[in-house]
Each structure stands twice: as C-alpha cells, then as structure tokens.
C-alpha cells in the first residue's frame, strides 16, 4: 500500500473517516442514490454511526431506495431523527407514514435539492459519496471499477456544499485519476471498503420496452401527440423515465424521427440503453445524463464524449443561471393520481402511504414546453383521475397534456393544442370526460381523508411548501 | 337457499377476485381487498345483489379481491354459487326460510 | 369492416377490459381453446357479464363458442346471445350440419332474449379438411352466416403436414375458402399469424392474404393489429381510382347513362362495389374523413 502512505486523505476505516469529520449529534449527513437498489453505503454509514453512539442525525439523501430499510432501525434507535430526500421507496415510506419519525420528512425535487444547498436553506455537515473509482486524493467517478454505475450527477452539489466530504470506494486507482467527476479539491477523506454495492442490483440488465398492449397503446398516443404538436423537428429535445411505457414512447419517437429524417438535439435525465442506441444511431446528438439506469448507459457514458455527465444543479436547479430542463421540448412523466386541475401525485399511494417522490418530475414539468403525463386510466379498479390528488407533488399549471389508453386531455390553459391533436385524428376529451369514463368502469371511489399528524412536507422546486403528507393509521 | 358445499371461482390475478363460498348457518360476507377503503361498500352491495338474485340466504362468502371490476365480481360470485349448488339441487332445503341473522364482516 | 379480428381469452378479466381500447375491428371472446374444461362455466359467466356492462364501442362483439359437439355449446349460445353478442364464431364447422345446429339453438336463444329473429350472426371457423371441402355448403346454409374464417393450425394437423411460416400448405385451403365465401357475398378472414413477436412476418402474411381476396385476418395478439391494418391499407393510387370510379358512376346516374367508361375502361357494378370497398378500407385506415365516406355511401 505504497499509495496510501503518500496521502493523508486515505483513512484506514469508515469509523476513522467519520471521526476525522468531527461529526456531532444533531448534524446532517448526505448520500446519493446512483447505486439504486444495490447501495451498501448509506446502510454501512448508519451502522457505523450507531456503533459510534451518534444520535439525532438528519439524513439528506437524493433518494431513499428499497434497500435502505436499515434506516427504519436507525430511526427506532434514535440515531436518525430527520430525513430530507427527493424520493422515498415504500419500504421506508410506509414506516414514515405510520408516524415513526419524530420530525417531518422534507421532500424536495432533484432540482430543488441543489438549489436549497446553494441558497443555504439546506445544509450538509458531512457528505458520504460512493464512488466506483477514486484515487487517494479523492478524484473520483462512477464510471470505472467493478461497481461502476455511470453518472454521479446528484452527488456533485453535495461535494461542493458540504462542510466535510468523504469519498467511499471499493476501487482505489493510482493518482491522478483522469476521468474525474468530483475533483480532489472538494474531498476531505477517502475510505476504501470491500464493496460499495451489489453489482446485480446497482444496474438492472437492459431496461425493457413493455409488451403490455395497453402500455404500448399509451406510448403510441404519446408519440403521436408529440408529433402532432409539431415538436419532431431538428434539434428536438426530450426526456422520459425508465418505466416500460415511457421506454416504448421513446422507441416510437425514435422511430418517427428516423422516418422523418429529424436529428434531435439531446435527451436528458435518467439514461437507458434505449436512449444510448438512439445516440449511437445519430437520432440524437447528445445525452445529458444525471443518472444511469442500466449497464448500457453506464458503459456508454464512460466511452462516448457525446454522452455527457451533468450535475443535478445543471440538470434542474431553479437557482442556476440556466438548466437543461428549461431547454426541454417534451417530457413524458408518470402519475399515481392526477387531479382535474392536472396537479399530479407521485408521492403517495391510493391510501395516502408514502411510496415515491418527485425526483425530477416537477422540475421537468416546469421546464419542458410540453409536459405529458402518460398513465393508464384505471389501475386495479382505481381511477387515475380524481378531484384532488392525495398529495400534490407537481402543480397542475405545469402539466400540459394527459395521455391514457382511452384518449387524451389537454390542460385548458393549453387550448392551443386542441387543433393539433384533433387534426391528427387523436382521441381528445376533457379531463372531466376521461374521469367519467373511468368511473363508469370502476364506480366512484369513496373519498379518503387522512386526519393524522403531518409526517412529511412537499417542498416545491421554488422552495415553497406545496403540500403536506399526513400519517395513515391502519 | 343455502350453500351446501364449498366452492371457488376466480383467481388471485390482478383485476380478478377469488370467491370462496362455504356452508354456514348464517349469511356472512368477508371482503379482503386493496381497495376496500374506496370500494368496500360497493363490493358488499354487489355481492348482496347477486346473493339475493340467486336466492341465497345462508352461507359464508369470502371475497379475496385483487381490484376486480364490478362485472367481474358479479360473474365470479355467480359462478362460485352455481358450483356450490350443482348436484346439490335436489337435496337443497326447499323452504328457504330460516330466519337467520345476517352478519357482515369486513 | 372485418380487417382485424382479435381473440381475447375468455377467462382473464384484465385482458377482457383491454377490448374496450384495442384498435381492432372485431373482438372475439374465446370460450373454446383459451379456456380449460374446468373453467368453461366461469368464462361463460364472465363474458356474459362483460358484454352486458362494458362498452366495447363500435367493435363487433363475437364470441367463439365451444365445439357444437359438446354440451357447452348450447349454454354458450343461450348465455352470450342474451348478453348482447353481435355474432358467434362456430369452431370446427363442417358443412351445413354444424351451421344448422348452431342456427337452431340461436333461434331459441333469440326468442328467450327477446331479440328479433336472425339478429345474431354466425362466423364459421373452418379448420378441417372436410370443413374446407364443404365450405360453400356451410356458407350457404343459413342467412345468419356473415363470414368464413380459416383455422390453419388445426387444418395442418388434420392434413398431416407441418405448419410453416411460408404457409404453402394452406394455399389450396385459402383460395378455396375465399372462393366459397365470396361466392355467397361473405367476408373471408384469414388464419392468424402465430408468432406474436414477429410484426413484420404478420404484415407479409396479411398482405399475401389480402392479395388472395381475404377481407381480414384473425389475430392472436394485439401486436398484430398494426401490421394487419397496414397490410389492408389501400395505396394512394387505389384510393384515387376508387374516388374517380364513384364520382363517374354518380355522374352517369345523374345524366341517366347506363354504362360509363373511365380511363378508357368500362365501369360496371362489380367495379363500383370494389371501389366502395376500397374507400371503406381507406376510411378505416384514416386516409379519408368519415364524412366523405358516408356521403359516398349515401349516393
């Protein structure tokens, strides 16, 4: 270990690194979620903090994933008493919804989080950054090493704004690392561990287009709507999620662009192999990648200079001087519920239990010229459209179009879409008509109202409180 | 009429409902459903409708719902009862009047 | 219009619901092969409930009933007729025997359901060597018959040959069926393409069927609807010619002329009928607005 002797940054253990940070009870520690459902780092750090006897810590994580259930134990033990995040998987969300945490969870957006760090609204005392490769001075990335995960975009603001930055890696490389995503000048300490994550869960295999005919029908309508609105021209830019329907829509859009001979400018957001294929074919000129969803994306960002890693701040911060989301022509988003005013819930399920979060939902909806919600009108007897969603995650005024398998509805503020859509022979209804269609099928659901105490606050991307989430008692 | 033997209909797939009907001295309807808070009453009403239409006064009815639409619920319950009554038709209590108390549980 | 005729398994509620939105001309709710012997009663009840309560829009609602030789067939016919099926698909049809058996139960079913006699149609699925040889006899056995359909899988088994992608083994059956059906003024529907994942293969198969005179194709997967519609989409020049034919005939009628020529060719009634069929396909393919085609038809 010649290398480690030459630097003061490499710590013999996570415990030593935490001690070196002067972490104190009541402070805030931060994490990023690029290791997705395979992340070991958040759990390891909480375990070590428990051993070291810390209490009253606040966890500020870009997302809480399915593998983070040890967080529930840390809350029970009083080690963690606060959570700030942009997304929370049901595995932890349900515990929060039952009132486990003393303080309110603060939900932000992927853009709102770096903005809060920039403005000082949120503060990180110690940032823990999982890197798949690092040198002894903390020059690091997510692109190399056995646990490669691609873009490390969400952690970049943490590195800039945290008082103390600890890089945790399972792949120490000689100084200087050349492909640097987070540079040494921001890093205080480096810890080498056996493994930062379960490689099989960090990256799924190829993300797949749905074969479900209803998903494909929604995707087809979505692609045709985007074309009908005149957006499929040279320099078209768009974003879509990794869900099967979104992917199918992306595939259909790529197909139409090929037929029309159109070259897009960029696709952004979480990047999948499907978008990588479109880049390699020349359908898009570049990808702006804040997170890789699969192995193909992680491999591409490492070798293709047109596949660009971006920070969460450049991606979507409303405080930034300009952002990627503001250049988007179209975004395709999901919803668990949508109100008749087009406001969308992606935080809670039909019973009001926490099972998600905005992520980049509100950011892209606010930025894109055409923000589309693509979702099935009915799921297991539950209608998608409600008078008012259980939780407002994204304000209705930022959503332009709802696409379901039964047809589509534009936001009345976008009456200009009417002629384009009907002119293309697409089935257009008012959102009330679609709601009625669904209720004819399902019956009218009884309105639920949770009267429990507040367990979480949804902070809009501008920093204002958008809604609150209340406890659900079984 | 009363249910004379145990019978099933439906499945546990999404959008379906697994109906089990069993003999019982009273009439009970048990509903298990992910949408019980939104549609529990509606499910119970439809079940009673089908039971009334088929003149069923006694039996333990269990609905393990997976978000079935009303038409599916009615079809499955109808099938389960028909299956329970098959072969037993001639031995069934013809009076149909048994003054039972109706107990509903959710 | 019977371009795309989609089978939906009869005992899967989630998939039945899809029938309300999938873009097919005909929905065929299947009580036969897609339903196990033990679940025939459940599927029959489910489809009856679905037909009664769900809105399948303009799609023709067909139920494939069980083999007329089984005791299920009668229950199927009585129940789904009452529930509002537009037509029944009769499997393993062999000559007029099968048709008359189905038609007479249907007479009874319509009476029970208070429906006008003859309102429910029959689509004959022909899938045996004897069935093919007696196709014309079956097609002309009842005024209820609306269409003939080919079941290539069972037929190949009956012929003792293997079913191939090129489908050469079906050539005689296909042409024979088109001849028998068209001779009776019926639609003729081709056998399904069996690889759900091969959309292009389905397109080629459907294009070939169209070239033989079929009016549509059975589909075992929603993924085949788009290629089938593409195959039955007339070309721009076919549509232009059909519009010319129709307007030439209209002019001739206005001027009281009996015969009329267009582009140096005499136009007669079969040509007009063909043109009207082309315009119908064009409308269904979204090439003409609906108002235009109705105005054509109204003449």
Image (cartoon, coloured by chain):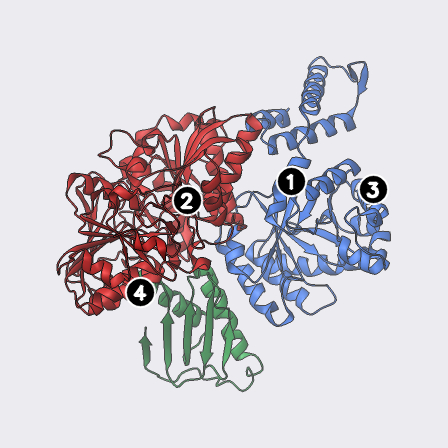
Chain colours: A red, B green, C blue
Residue drawn at the location 35% of the way across and 49% of the way down: A135
Closer-to-camera residue (B7/C111): B7
Q: Residue at x 15, y 43 (%)?
A: A121
Identify residue for label 2: A241
* Circles 2 and 3 in contact, beta carbons < 8 Å: no
Q: Position of residue A299 (x, y in %)?
A: 48, 45
Q: Could you tell me which chain the residue with mark 2 belongs to?
A: A
Kindly indicate the quadrant of the structure image that contains residue A12. bottom left
Q: Nearer the viewer, mark 3 or mark 1?
A: 1
Q: C3 above or below C250?
A: below
Residue that carries the numbered disc 3 in the rendered image: C179
Please tell me whether mark 3 sits on a helix, a strand or a loop: helix
Q: Nearer the viewer, mark 4 or mark 2?
A: 4
Q: CA distance from mark 3 to mark 1?
A: 25 Å
Residue C1 shows in this picture? no
Regarding mark 4 in the picture, which secondary structure is present there? loop
Residue named by callout 4: A69
Quadrant where the image shows the N terminus of chain A: bottom left
Are labels 2 and 3 on one chain?
no
Disc on res. C227:
1
Q: How far is mark 1 from mark 4, CA to CA?
A: 47 Å
Find the distance from the CA under tag 4 to the CA under tag 3.
Answer: 68 Å
Q: Secondary structure at mark 1?
A: helix
């Amino acid at each position: 270990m010649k290398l480690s002797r030459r630097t003061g940054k490499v710590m013999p253990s996570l415990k030593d690194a935490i001690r070196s940070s002067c972490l104190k009870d009541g402070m805030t520690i931060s994490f990023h979620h690029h290791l997705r459902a395979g992340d070991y780092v958040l759990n390891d750090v909480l375990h070590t903090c428990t051993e070291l006897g810390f209490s009253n810590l606040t966890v500020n994580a870009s997302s809480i994933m399915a593998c983070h259930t040890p967080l529930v134990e840390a809350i029970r033990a009083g080690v963690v008493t606060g959570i700030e995040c942009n997304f929370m998987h049901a595995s932890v969300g349900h515990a929060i919804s039952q009132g486990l945490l003393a303080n309110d969870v603060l939900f932000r957006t992927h853009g709102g989080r770096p903005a809060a760090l920039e403005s000082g609204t949120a503060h990180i005392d110690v940032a823990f950054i999982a890197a798949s490769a690092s040198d002894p001075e903390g020059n690091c990335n997510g692109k190399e090493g056995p646990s490669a995960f691609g873009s490390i975009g969400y952690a970049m603001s943490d590195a800039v704004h945290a008082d103390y930055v600890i890089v945790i890696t399972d792949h120490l490389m000689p100084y200087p690392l050349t492909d640097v995503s987070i540079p040494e000048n921001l890093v205080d300490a480096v810890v080498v561990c056996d493994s930062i994550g379960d490689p099989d869960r960090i990256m799924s295999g190829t993300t797949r287009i749905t074969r479900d005919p209803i998903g494909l029908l929604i995707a087809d309508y979505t692609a045709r709507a985007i074309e009908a609105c005149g957006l499929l021209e040279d320099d078209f830019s768009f974003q879509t999620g990794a869900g099967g329907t979104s992917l199918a829509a992306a595939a259909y859009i790529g197909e139409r662009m090929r037929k029309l001979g159109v070259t897009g400018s960029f696709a952004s957001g979480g990047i999948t192999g499907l978008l990588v294929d479109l880049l390699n074919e020349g359908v898009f000129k570049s990808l702006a990648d804040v997170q890789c969803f699969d192995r193909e994306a992680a491999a591409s960002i490492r070798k293709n200079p047109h596949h660009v890693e971006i920070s969460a701040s450049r991606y979507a911060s409303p405080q930034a001087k300009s952002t990627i989301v503001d250049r988007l022509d179209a975004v395709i988003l999901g919803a668990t519920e949508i109100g008749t005013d087009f406001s969308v819930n992606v935080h809670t399920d039909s019973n009001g239990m926490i099972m998600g979060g905005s992520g980049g939902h509100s950011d892209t909806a606010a930025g894109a010229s055409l923000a589309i919600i693509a979702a099935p009108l009915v799921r297991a007897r539950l209608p998608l459209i409600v008078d008012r969603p259980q939780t407002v995650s994204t304000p209705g005024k930022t959503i332009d179009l709802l696409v379901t398998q039964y047809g589509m509805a534009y936001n009345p503020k976008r009456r200009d879409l009417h002629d384009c859509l009907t002119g293309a022979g697409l089935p257009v209804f008012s959102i009330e008509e679609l709601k009625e269609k669904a209720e004819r099928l399902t019956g009218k659901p009884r309105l639920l109202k949770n009267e429990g105490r507040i367990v979480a606050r949804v902070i809009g991307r501008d920093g204002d409180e958008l809604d609150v989430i209340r406890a659900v008692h079984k | 009429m009363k249910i004379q033997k145990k019978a099933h209909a439906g499945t546990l797939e999404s959008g379906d409902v697994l109906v089990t009907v069993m003999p019982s001295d009273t009439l009970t309807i048990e509903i298990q459903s992910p949408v019980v808070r939104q549609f529990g009453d509606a499910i119970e009403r439809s079940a009673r409708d089908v039971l009334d239409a088929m003149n069923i006064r006694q039996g333990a009815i269990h609905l393990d719902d997976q978000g079935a639409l009303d038409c599916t619920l009615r079809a499955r319950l109808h099938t389960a009862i028909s299956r329970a009554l098959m072969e037993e038709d001639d031995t069934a209590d013809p009076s149909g009047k048994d003054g039972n108390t109706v107990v509903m549980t959710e | 219009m019977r371009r795309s005729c989609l089978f939906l398994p009869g005992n899967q509620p989630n998939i039945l619901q899809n029938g309300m939105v999938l873009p097919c001309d005909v929905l065929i709710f299947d009580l036969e092969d897609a339903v196990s012997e033990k679940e025939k009663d459940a599927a029959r009840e489910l489809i009856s409930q679905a037909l009664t309560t769900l809105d399948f829009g303009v799609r023709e609602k067909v139920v494939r009933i069980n083999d007329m030789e089984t005791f299920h067939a009668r229950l199927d016919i009585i129940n789904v007729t009452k529930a509002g099926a537009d037509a029944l698909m009769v499997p393993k049809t062999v000559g007029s025997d099968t048709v008359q058996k189905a038609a007479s139960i249907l007479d009874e079913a319509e009476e029970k359901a208070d429906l006008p006699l003859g309102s429910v149609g029959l689509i004959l699925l022909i899938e045996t060597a004897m069935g093919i040889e007696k196709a014309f006899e079956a097609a002309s056995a009842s005024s209820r018959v609306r269409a003939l359909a080919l079941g290539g899988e069972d037929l190949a088994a009956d012929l003792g040959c293997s079913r191939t992608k090129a489908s050469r083994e079906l050539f005689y059956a296909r042409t024979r069926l088109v001849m028998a059906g068209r001779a009776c003024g019926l639609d003729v529907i081709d056998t399904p393409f069996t690889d759900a994942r091969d959309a292009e293969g389905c397109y080629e198969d459907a294009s070939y069927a169209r070239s033989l005179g079929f009016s549509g194709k059975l589909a075992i997967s929603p993924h085949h609807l788009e290629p089938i519609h593409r195959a039955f989409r007339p070309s721009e020049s076919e549509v232009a010619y059909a519009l010319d034919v129709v307007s030439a005939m209209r002019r001739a009628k206005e001027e009281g002329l009996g015969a009329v020529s267009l582009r140096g060719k005499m136009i007669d009634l079969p040509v007009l009928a063909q043109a009207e069929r082309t315009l119908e396909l064009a409308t269904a393919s979204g090439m003409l607005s609906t108002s235009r085609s109705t105005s054509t038809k109204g003449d």
